[in-house]
Amino acid sequence: MHRVLMSALIFLIIVLSPYSKAYSQTVAPDSGSIQQIETEGLNPEPQAPVAAIADSIAVIKPFAPSLRLEGFSMYNFAAAYFYSRQKMTGLVWWDETSYEYTYTTTIFAAGASWNYLINNGLSLGGSLGLVNIGTSRSGGPESYYYSDYSNNSSMTLIGPRIAQYFGNKNSKFMPFVAGEMDIITTSYGSYGDSETIFRVGGGVIIKLVPSVGLSIGLDYLKIEDQKNTVNVMGTMGLVCMPFDLKNQ
């Protein structure tokens, strides 16, 4: 009997041992595995390859601003003031006596031009200017032939302008050529006159800061009704170019 019990116990151990081993090696699924199985069941589509995503991102490029000289206005301002006082000696011819008088001259000039750059440096615009000249004499003898006097005259200038600028918005130096037709009206008290002046010339804009520069030029002037004359004028002015590369 004892041998039968031992034999039965050994048989049970041999039969049950594989199941007990399998049970001990089986791991219960955790919540993460269950969530992964559920997700895979709801979204059977495969994920996009990393290379395809990288290619789609590479197509997107930042917008580069244009450096062409177009799409903005250019303003040129210039002004000048001149004052002269000179003591001179005169002669009274009938009694051959000399006298001293003071001769003064004042000149004020101001001008402005506006240009809009329409296409790669080509600009259209106009100019407006004012010139005032005053002269006086004082200190001379009061007589029929000599007396003190004061005279004042003014001139206004207006006309269209065309110019071609070279370079780009980042250029330190911007050469240009320009042509202009000015109508000048002159007034001396109650007397007035007008004439037309044609200007052709060129120069260069030197950038001081990105949107402000100094304009230096030389013009040839053809004055209406003048013959056998040569008129050359130097110009200098401050130029404002309000463009912003960041917003283009």
Image (spheres, helix red, strand yellow):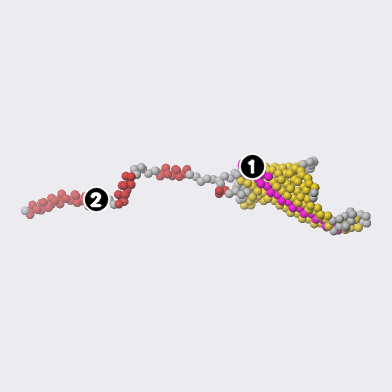
In the rendered view, does 112 fall on the left or right side of 12? Answer: right
Q: Is residue 166 visible?
A: no
Q: Which of marks 2 and 1 is in front?
A: 1
Instruction: Give x and y (percent) for residue 49.
Output: 39, 43
Looking at the rendered structure, the kind of residue marked 1 is Leu
**Which residue extends farthest left?**
1
Instruction: Give x and y (percent) for residue 234.
Output: 72, 48
- Mark 2: secondary structure: loop
**Disc sitting over residue 122 in the figure:** 1
Q: Which residue shows up at 85% across the image and 58% down it?
A: 139
Look at the image and give the residue range highlighted in magenta. 100-126
Distance in Å between CA atoms under marks 2 and 1: 84 Å
Q: Which residue shows up at 78% across the image and 48% down it?
A: 187
In the rendered view, does 73 fall on the left or right side of 55? Answer: right
Badge 2, how many Cα within 10 Å: few under 14, some, many 20+? few
The answer to whether residue 105 is above or below residue 55 is below
Q: Which residue shows up at 31% across the image and 49% down it?
A: 35
The answer to whether residue 141 is above or below residue 183 is below
Magenta region includes residue 125 = yes
Looking at the rendered structure, the kind of residue marked 2 is Thr
Q: Nearer the viewer, residue 198 or 14?
A: 198
In the rendered view, does 22 fall on the left or right side of 231? Answer: left
Q: Which residue shows up at 21% across the image and 50% down it?
A: 22
Q: Earlier in the sequence, mark 2 or mark 1?
A: 2
- Mark 1: secondary structure: strand
Instruction: Give x and y (percent) for residue 57.
Output: 45, 45
Badge 1, how many Cα within 10 Å: few under 14, some, many 20+? some
Magenta region includes residue 178 = no
Q: Which of 24 and 60 is in front in this view?
A: 60
Give the residue pinned by disc 2: 26
Majority secondary structure in the magenta region: strand
